Image (cartoon, helix red, strand yellow):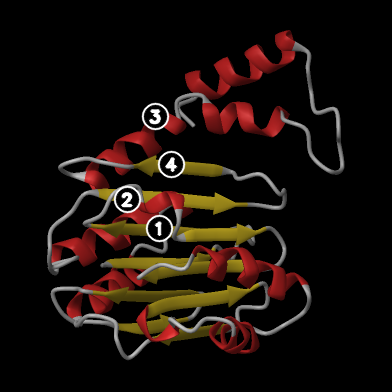
Amino acid sequence: MTWSIIARDSPTGRFGIAVATRFFAVGARVPHIAAGFGAVATQALVNPYYGIDGLTLLRAGKSPREAIELLKAGDSGHASRQVHIMDATGRIAAYTGPECVDWCGHVEGDGFSIAGNMLAGAAVLDDTAAAFIAHANLPFARRLIAAMHAGEAAGGDKRGKQSAALLIHGSEEWSDLDLRVDDHTDPLRELERLEAVSRERWVHFRPFLPTRKNPGGITDRNIIDASVEAAVAAGK
């Protein structure tokens, strides 16, 4: 019922997941990321614990393949699940249960993994991958969205479209960007609009928040406001 891309941004080490589907609020259940460990996308007849427990297993040092086998072993319904995982070293593993609805499958490449089910055809994943590779010059968030647009143009979810999401994590436990379009006639276009809005002020404000290295962050509003306004004026 869904297709998603997990990717790692080589210049920054950030992890991102973009996802779209003909179902409500896909961003609430599919994408899971743990800074420094990796990312999990759980879909089809979704088992939310694949995301929660999958990240726990990565933190414990399990490989993506080991994590998937352990997730399956504890789930009597795994034949209806689809999951793919990438860890911090770039290792990838995926599972598509035999009861997932056609078209379903998985492709991967250097720094990315794409999986989907109930799709119009294999071209959805192939074109998503091709666009991700072709748009290496784009900033990470826009690159992920461009890849999903290509998959949608190839047919996307064969039932139509309803929701989409984009989740990006950097070095902190909290997200760099967490955008959700829960119910919309054109969710990827709306996701694209929200990403553009995030660049108006949020991405310039984000560096002032507390981090593990600087637990207090920066709270001087004059410094914050001046920096944000300068970035906006420079069109960054």
Q: Quadrant of the N terminus?
A: bottom left
- Mark 4 and mark 1 lie on one chain; the one further toward the N terminus is 1
Label 4 residue SS: strand
Does 82 appear above or below 31?
below
The crowd level at tag 3 (other Cα within 10 Å; few <14, some 14-19, many 20+) is few
Residue at x-position 59% and y-position 43% = 176
- Mark 4 and mark 2 lie on one chain; the one further toward the N terminus is 2
As measured in the structure, the alpha-carbon distance from the residue carrying label 3 to the one carrying label 4 is: 11 Å
Q: Which mark is residue 18?
A: 1
- Mark 3 and mark 4 lie on one chain; the one further toward the N terminus is 4
Label 1 residue SS: strand
**Residue furthest top in the image:** 222
As measured in the structure, the alpha-carbon distance from the residue carrying label 4 to the one carrying label 1 is: 10 Å
As measured in the structure, the alpha-carbon distance from the residue carrying label 3 to the one carrying label 2 is: 16 Å
Q: Which residue is mark 2?
A: 164
Q: Amino acid at mark 4?
A: Leu
Q: Which residue is mark 4?
A: 179
Does 179 appear above or below 220?
below
Mark in the foreground, 3 or 4: 4
Label 2 residue SS: strand
Residue 5: quadrant of the picture: bottom left
- Mark 3 and mark 2 lie on one chain; the one further toward the N terminus is 2
- Mark 2 and mark 1 lie on one chain; the one further toward the N terminus is 1
* Position of residue 158 measured from the top left corner of the image (x, y, whole percent): 13, 68
Q: Amino acid at mark 1?
A: Ala
Q: Which residue is mark 3?
A: 197
Q: Amino acid at mark 2?
A: Ala
Label 3 residue SS: helix
Q: Which mark is residue 131?
A: none
Tell me if 124 is positioned left or right of 115 in this view: left
* Position of residue 166 measured from the top left corner of the image (x, y, whole percent): 43, 50
